[in-house]
Image (cartoon, coloured by chain):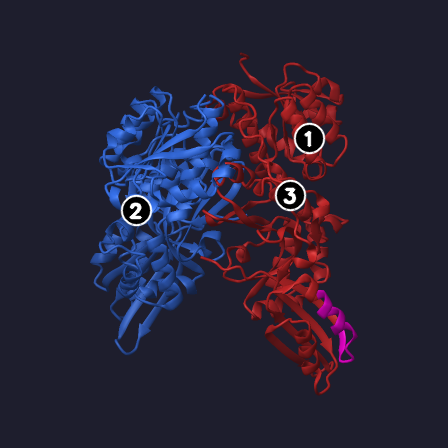
Chain colours: A red, B blue
């Protein structure tokens, strides 16, 4: 047996730099946890000169992937390049060369997981990815181990820091979407092209990974119904608060024994008393329901150099322990179920709908009748009239309604003469708490 | 290799019944997670006849411990008897017979851990105890695995459901301690002798276990400074709320690099914006600070039949996987550090103090001077006068103060002529958030 567990790092950017730091700072502790020292030997990065200046000769820096992937002394490859290519190809080559892989790359996992996991298995390699969802929060590990005896019934997560920062800011400071987006961009919390965050794609990738682990099967991005936060206005958050709700962008996976698994990302109203409602700013959190555990929530920092490195290094330790005990593949085959997706129109939940209406007698009656005709019953109705602008707004929250019936009702409302516009539709999650 | 992993259950009470249920209901899933079916074969319980009636011949029931502990076909012993004896002796015998052990018994762990862990190691047995702290919440597992690369700096937990229910009730319904205790007893949330809960002993046992794992060493009950919630009145919670704080019974373990580890259980004021402040009712939560992860919180149901069984069964799966991969003892030696305790008088935190004073000119000046003389500076002062009772109350929150200086200041205040009584002292945790 070798004296060290040797790690090759692909990508020495923000998170990669964090991994170098954690493995060095806590080297002694990690060696005791594993039973053998763990060290990074080679680092692939295109900024070789800059890195040599920063780190000296502590590590071998190279811009040639072969030097890392073909190095027979390297046991574990840590892939932190991001994006789909060439990360996916590098991971596949690592397995082909018998190397274990740790990645934080949700793009690769959500798109090529179904291809890469069997490859890892075939070459008797471990493939771990705690850092790919919610940065520092331990959630993949607990789902695979502590909660493994449960049938998971649902997962709801605040898994995108940008949108949570924006919605928290809109709620606390009564600001509008555009204003908050600009500020988030100025502070570096939102990218100059914020589409993937505000449109829900980033969250969709994460729920694909979470649901695959939770429901022991493999989903992909096409399985997720995605809706972003772009249509949320400050007044929607105000109405929500008045009605006892917070508005969050939730990634939701539910296993309905009758209709199958539904995966969706959408702005969601949750009761202010729900543990997720208080998760603000840059925090992420994942709320799990299981048939034994009942309810559990995992909260922490969803991004950032050191939190993400914490998860990467936890995975490295896990693999190193497997190497020490010749137990590679100890938890490999967790995706053993056939996937059964719920048809989108069968998903059901209450809905919040904000309408602009003509200020005429009988407006509310016409709208209520339209809902009733589609079998949609209402549990809250708020009508307001702004004297200055002479605009009338009606806000309703329905009882639980199937997507099919909701869409039909919205279609009819759109052509009602009294309805000037449907300004916002938000799903409501009322799932009962302990 | 055998076709089954065979489990012997000691104690078929509330949690034991939950374990029987989970292992039966989710047998198929668990077999896939492990790679082999897991089954309970024998159950030790004194109510043999009643259990036979309930379960028929699914399991062999016995009131003779030898029949379980000496059964060569049993691989794992699940100890759910509670209390120190004979649980401790049974666990020791299980190890002597080469059997792995899962327990939920915090009394045994907090008192005899230092004796039992080496015994498990000597016989190459796994010893797991996720259920011993906070029922269903995965926290021991994540500390040992996902967070293993961190130096943990502090752990703060709401780890006792009874007191959290009581304090939540006092806060939300402005009720007094005695009233709430009576109601909690009537509802079964508090025992007829509530001392261990309200006095902090139950929480102390749990922080001993959490801190031992988090700081990789072994503590025992004597290392914890314990204070209960008995002196908290409704008005203290009211003052706290007005000043922006919630009052929780926290179990706190901090690793101060200079002074060592401090372990304490005491009523604590935490900012309302802190994630622990919103953890109400029967929820438990553990908030962890680590040098890489930053902050993380684990929330869930701290007790109950199925949540606790979820943790027990997760441990069974973990051991069964080790058996499948011959990797027993894969994570065994996590307590490798020398323990260094912080002297109690060096612990420091801000403090809330409520005083009854004589309504005389100069009262506040005399009190402020007494604090000043002990180098205790004040950051909040509230003075109120109840016209009806003609009682004057002064509430102060100090800046961070060492226990030694605080006690000295309290001693001087007690003998000041203007001070009629010191009604309540509560520590404040302001630790900064992300």
Q: Position of residue B347 (x, y in %)?
A: 34, 42
Cα distance in 3D space between marks 3 and 2? 39 Å
- Let me know if residue A111 appears in the view: yes
Magenta stretch holds residue A191: no
**Looking at the image, residue A399 lies above or below residue B433:** below
Q: Position of residue B27 (x, y in %)?
A: 47, 39
Residue drawn where x is 61% and y is 70% of the image: A397
**Disc 1 sits on a residue from what chain?**
A
Q: Position of residue B31 (x, y in %)?
A: 50, 34
**Disc 2 sits on a residue from what chain?**
B
Around disc 2, counting alpha carbons within 10 Å, would you say few (fewer than 14), some (14 to 19), or many (20 or more)?
A: few
Cα distance in 3D space between marks 1 and 3? 18 Å
- Let me know if residue B135 appears in the view: no
Residue named by callout 1: A116
Quadrant of the image occupied by residue A269: bottom right
- Range of residues picked out in magenta: A407-421
**Nearer the observer, A237 or A346:** A346
State whether the magenta stretch is mostly helix, strand or loop: helix
Residue named by callout 2: B53
Residue named by callout 3: A339
**Nearer the observer, A257 or A50:** A257
Q: Are marks 3 and 2 in contact (CB under 8 Å)?
A: no
Around disc 1, counting alpha carbons within 10 Å, would you say few (fewer than 14), some (14 to 19), or many (20 or more)?
A: some
**Disc 3 sits on a residue from what chain?**
A
Q: Secondary structure at mark 3?
A: loop
To the question of a shared chain for discs 3 and 2, the answer is no
Marks 3 and 2: which is nearer the front?
2
Question: What is the quadrant of the C terminus of chain A in the image?
Answer: bottom left
């Amino acid at each position: 047996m070798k004296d060290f567990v040797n790690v090759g790092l692909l990508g020495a950017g923000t998170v990669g730099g964090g991994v170098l730091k954690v493995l060095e700072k806590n080297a002694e502790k990690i060696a005791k946890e594993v039973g053998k020292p763990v060290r990074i030997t080679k680092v692939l990065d295109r900024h070789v000169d800059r890195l040599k200046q920063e780190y000296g000769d502590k590590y071998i820096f190279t811009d040639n992937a072969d030097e890392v992937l073909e190095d027979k002394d390297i046991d574990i490859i840590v892939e932190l390049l991001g994006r789909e290519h060439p990360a996916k190809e590098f991971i596949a080559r690592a397995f082909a060369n018998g190397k274990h892989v740790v990645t934080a790359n949700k793009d690769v996992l959500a798109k090529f997981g179904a291809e890469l996991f069997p490859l890892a298995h075939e070459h008797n390699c471990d493939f771990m990815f705690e850092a790919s969802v919610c940065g520092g929060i331990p959630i993949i590990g607990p789902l695979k181990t502590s909660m493994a005896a449960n049938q998971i019934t649902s997962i709801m997560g605040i898994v995108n820091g940008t949108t949570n920062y924006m919605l928290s800011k809109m709620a606390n400071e009564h600001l509008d979407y555009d204003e908050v987006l600009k500020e988030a961009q100025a502070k570096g919390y939102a990218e100059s092209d914020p589409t993937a965050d505000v449109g829900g794609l980033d969250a969709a990738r994460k729920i694909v990974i979470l649901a695959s682990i939770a429901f022991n099967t493999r989903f992909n991005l096409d399985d997720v119904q995605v809706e972003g936060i772009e249509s949320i206005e400050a007044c929607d958050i105000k109405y929500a608060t008045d009605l006892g709700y917070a508005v969050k962008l939730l990634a939701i996976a539910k296993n309905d024994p009758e209709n199958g698994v539904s995966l969706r990302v959408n702005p969601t109203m949750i009761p202010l008393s729900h543990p997720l409602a208080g998760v603000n700013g840059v925090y992420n959190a994942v709320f799990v329901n299981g048939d034994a555990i009942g309810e559990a929530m995992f909260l922490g920092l969803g991004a950032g150099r050191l939190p993400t490195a914490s998860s990467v290094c936890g995975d490295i330790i896990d693999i190193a322990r497997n190497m020490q005990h010749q137990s590679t593949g100890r938890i490999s085959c967790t995706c053993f179920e056939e996937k059964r997706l719920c048809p989108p129109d069968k998903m059901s939940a209450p809905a919040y709908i904000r309408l602009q209406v003509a200020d005429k007698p009988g407006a509310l009656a016409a709208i209520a009748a339209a809902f009733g005709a589609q079998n949609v019953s209402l549990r809250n109705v708020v009508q307001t009239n702004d004297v200055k602008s002479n605009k009338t707004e009606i806000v309703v929250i329905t009882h639980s309604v199937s997507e099919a019936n909701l869409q039909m009702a919205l279609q009819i409302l759109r052509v009602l003469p009294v309805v000037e516009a449907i300004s916002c539709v938000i799903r409501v999650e009322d799932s009962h708490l302990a």
